[in-house]
């Protein structure tokens, strides 16, 4: 299978369906992905076996920042190196375009994969109901990398965020946050510095 990039709306719609079935039942923003297809077509990658998508990696780039939004592989094609090949190609394309780093959020299933690829993890803790101060009140042994309020759009509710620097995944700490702050969510986020090679 060779690496392809999304080139038309039919391919985009097929890839959106694949991502929903494979990774995320949540609604994907088709309009945002259409804009990305026009602005950064070489960052929407997939591999297909005939007409069946086997794996996909979607990246975005804006204002000198790059991130990877979706990495997924069909169950029938897992552990065959397709996601790794797509990620390596994505990282290559980002380097060629001059990006210095890339970020992504990981599912628990993907954490080891990203660490093996050289990404460095931090723990993101966020809540719409609790303040940053409340989230920081749970004293941990880890240094605070950043904290603040994030809004996806002017009309969306503010989200308190705390990011902790961890040397490795600490599932007990994640569960402790989720227990103490019931509406709180935690997720490992990863970054990689992209040196030109």
Image: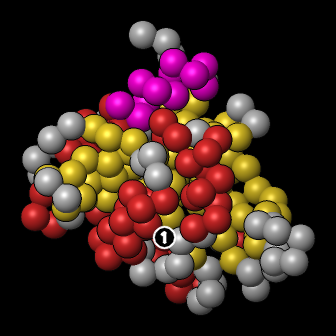
Secondary structure under tag 1 reads: helix
Residue at 64 percent of width and 65 percent of height: 31
Residue 137 makes an appearance in the image: no
Image location of residue 4, percent across then percent down: 32, 40
* Vertical relation: 119 (above or below) 13: above
- 59 left or right of 161 in image: left
Expressed as whole percent of the image width and height from the top left, the position of residue 106 reads 43, 58
Q: Is residue 97 magenta?
A: yes
Quarter of the image for residue 138 reads: bottom right
Q: Name the residue under label 1.
A: 174
Quarter the N terminus occupies = top left
The relative height of residue 12 versus residue 67 in the rendered view (above or below) is below
Start and end of the magenta stretch? 89-99
Q: Is residue 159 left or right of residue 61?
A: right
Residue that sits furthest to the top in the current view = 197
Number of labels in the image equals 1
Which is more toward the observer, 30 or 68? 30
Q: Which residue is drawn at 39% across and 57% down?
A: 11
Does residue 3 appear left or right of residue 170 in this picture?
Answer: left
48, 19: nearer the viewer: 48
| Residue plotted at (46% across, 77% down) | 175
Does residue 92 belong to the magenta stretch? yes
In this view, the residue farthest toward the bottom is: 182
Q: In this rendered view, identify the residue nearer to me: 90 or 167.
A: 90
Could you say which is closer to the camera, residue 140 or residue 54? Answer: 54
The residue shown at (76%, 67%) is 152
> For the stretch drawn in magenta, what is the main secondary structure?
helix
Residue 52 screen position, x and y as percent = 19, 61
Q: Position of residue 22 (x, y in %)?
A: 30, 71
Q: How did the renderer colour the structure?
A: secondary structure
Question: Where is the C terminus found, in terms of image quarters?
Answer: top left
């Amino acid at each position: 299978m060779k690496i392809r990039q999304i080139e038309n709306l039919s391919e985009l719609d097929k890839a959106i369906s694949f991502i929903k079935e494979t990774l995320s039942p949540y609604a994907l923003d088709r309009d945002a992905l259409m804009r990305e297809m026009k602005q950064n077509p070489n960052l929407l990658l997939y591999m297909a076996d005939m007409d069946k998508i086997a794996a996909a990696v979607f990246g975005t780039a804006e204002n000198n920042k790059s991130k990877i939004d979706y990495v997924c592989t069909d169950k029938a094609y897992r552990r065959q190196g397709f996601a790794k090949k797509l990620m390596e190609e994505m990282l290559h394309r980002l380097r060629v375009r001059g990006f210095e780093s890339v970020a992504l959020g990981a599912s628990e299933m993907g954490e080891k994969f990203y660490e093996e690829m050289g990404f460095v993890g931090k723990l993101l803790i966020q809540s719409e109901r609790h303040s940053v101060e409340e989230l920081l009140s749970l004293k941990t042994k880890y240094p605070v990398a950043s904290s603040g309020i994030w809004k996806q759009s002017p009309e969306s509710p503010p989200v308190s965020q705390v990011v902790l620097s961890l040397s490795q995944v600490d599932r007990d700490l994640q569960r402790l946050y989720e227990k103490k702050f019931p509406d709180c969510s935690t997720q490992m986020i990863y970054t990689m510095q992209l040196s030109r090679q």
